Structures are given as structure tokens and as C-alpha cells.
Amino acid sequence: MEERAFGSVMQELRKGKGLSQEELAFRCGLDRTYISLLERSLRVPTIVTLFKVSVVLEIRPEEFIARMNVQDRNYGEGSHLDQ
Amino acid sequence: MEERAFGSVMQELRKGKGLSQEELAFRCGLDRTYISLLERSLRVPTIVTLFKVSVVLEIRPEEFIARMNVQDRNYGEGSHLDQ
DNA sequence: ACTAAATGCAGACTATAGTCCGTGGAGCGG
DNA sequence: CCGCTCCACGGACTATAGTCTGCATTTAGT
């Protein structure tokens, strides 16, 4: 199905923004332990959760999904990964 | 959150392929009544369900999500909205 | 009018998304 | 060593995704 896990993409984006799991959870209105479960791929989010996380991580949800499909595509040239 | 419902996009794609709810459900490995619930936005799918439906409807999941964003959503001064 | 396909919908389920408590361990600065 | 932050993890929840069965209604064809 998905080539790359949702949680892996989320963790990468979270660390890229220098957020702790707890801080991300708070800003998303989700539970701290649930973010942990997501990153370890022990839960599958609904698309509503995808949208919530995308807002906080400042990425378009479709871009988030796109990153799950392909490992190497020249994402960004570091354009929106920095900050 | 989403401007356009998941179910609305799914129904449009389903009809575009001339499939009944039952046929779509069968090909997705989902229940017929659940497809009905999704189209009426009485349920929110997980991303796994998004992927299943996308395969059958022959659309990339990120494109599916993108079609939910008909209205503009602003994530921080258009830094990654372009492209 | 009759038939059949397609869908809405209700109810009672099962599986899992998501919460809320806590504990313990790894890492790090003082 | 001590305190602090971050995170993995457990257990016991609550909410909701998703199934299954059955029936009623609508729509289109003949």
C-alpha cells in the first residue's frame, strides 16, 4: 500500500521544525502518546488527523501523502525543509 | 478543515467510472453500506481506506486529497503553496 | 403495473482510532 | 549525583471506523 509510513514522514517534518512530540501534540490538539504511536506506525490516522497535523507542520496534506509514496524525488532542494 | 468532503470527491470519481456503490465496495474490499456512509460524509476514512479507494478509482491518493482543497487554505505566507 | 438494480438507512455488532493516567529509561547540563 | 526533557511503553479506558443483516424507497426498463 504505502511505500513509506505516515509516521516516518511526520517524524521527519516534526524534527525539521524542532518540535517535541508533546509540543506537536499540543498544537494539533492530539494526545502526546498518540503522536508517539503514530510515529512508530502503531496507529493509522484518519484523514482529519492528517489535516490537523499538516496544518501544524505547515505542509499541504496532499504533499504529505505524496511523500509517503516516493522515497526519492527531488523534494524541495531544501526549499521548505529548512526553517 | 476540508473545504470539500471526501465523500463528494469519491462519488464524483465513482460515477465517472460508471461504478455502483456495491461494485466499488467489492473492488475495495469494503462494505457497501460503508461506501454509502462515506459518500454522505457520515464517516471519516483512515488513510489506509483512502489508499484502497484511490487504487480502484485509479487516482493518486495525493490527487484525491488535493481535490478536497478546492478553496484556498493558507499555510504561512505561501512559502510552499506555490510550486 | 411489475421487476430489478441501486441506494438510504436502522440496529447491533467488532476492530481500532484516539485519550488519559502512569512508569521507567536514555541523554544531557549543572 | 541530581534534576530535567524527551520519549517508549503499558493499561484501561471512550469514540468512532468499518461490518453485517435486513428492509424500505427510488429509479429505470419493459
Image: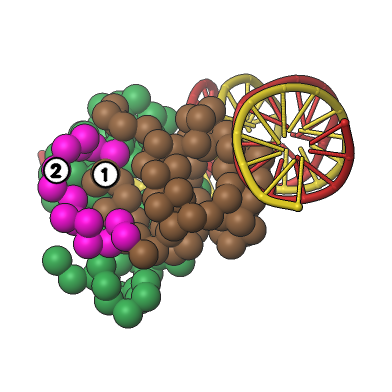
Chain colours: A brown, B green, C yellow, D red
Q: Which residue does the image show at 61% across and 56% down from the upper left?
A: A23
In the image shown, does A76 or C2 lie closer to the viewer?
A76
The percent coordinates of residue A44 (x first, y second) are: 48, 35
The percent coordinates of residue A27 (x first, y second) are: 59, 62
Local crowd at mark 1 within 10 Å, few (<14), some, or many (≥20)? many
Is A51 covered by the magenta stretch?
A: no
Residue type at tag 1: Arg
Task: State the extent of the magenta-drawn residues as a range.
Answer: A68-82
Q: Which mark is residue A10?
A: none
Q: Which mark is residue A73?
A: 2
Q: Which residue does the image show at 27% across and 76% down from the upper left?
A: B78
Residue type at tag 2: Arg
Q: Kindly indicate whether the residues beneath marks 1 and 2 are on one polypeptide chain.
A: yes
* Quarter of the rendering occupied by the C terminus of chain B: bottom left
Relative side of B29 to B55, left or right: right
Is A72 covered by the magenta stretch?
A: yes
Q: Which residue does the image show at 31% across and 32% down from the upper left?
A: A4
* Chain of the residue on which disc 1 is drawn: A
- Would you place residue A57 above or below residue A4 in this image? below
Q: Which residue does the image show at 22% across and 56% down from the upper left?
A: A78
Relative side of A19 to B31, left or right: right
Q: Which mark is residue A67?
A: 1
Q: Which label's residue is closer to the chain start, 1 or 2?
A: 1
Residue A36 sits in quarter: top right
Relative side of B64 to A59, left or right: left
Magenta segment's dominant SS is loop
Tell how many labels. Answer: 2
The percent coordinates of residue B50 (x first, y second) are: 34, 41
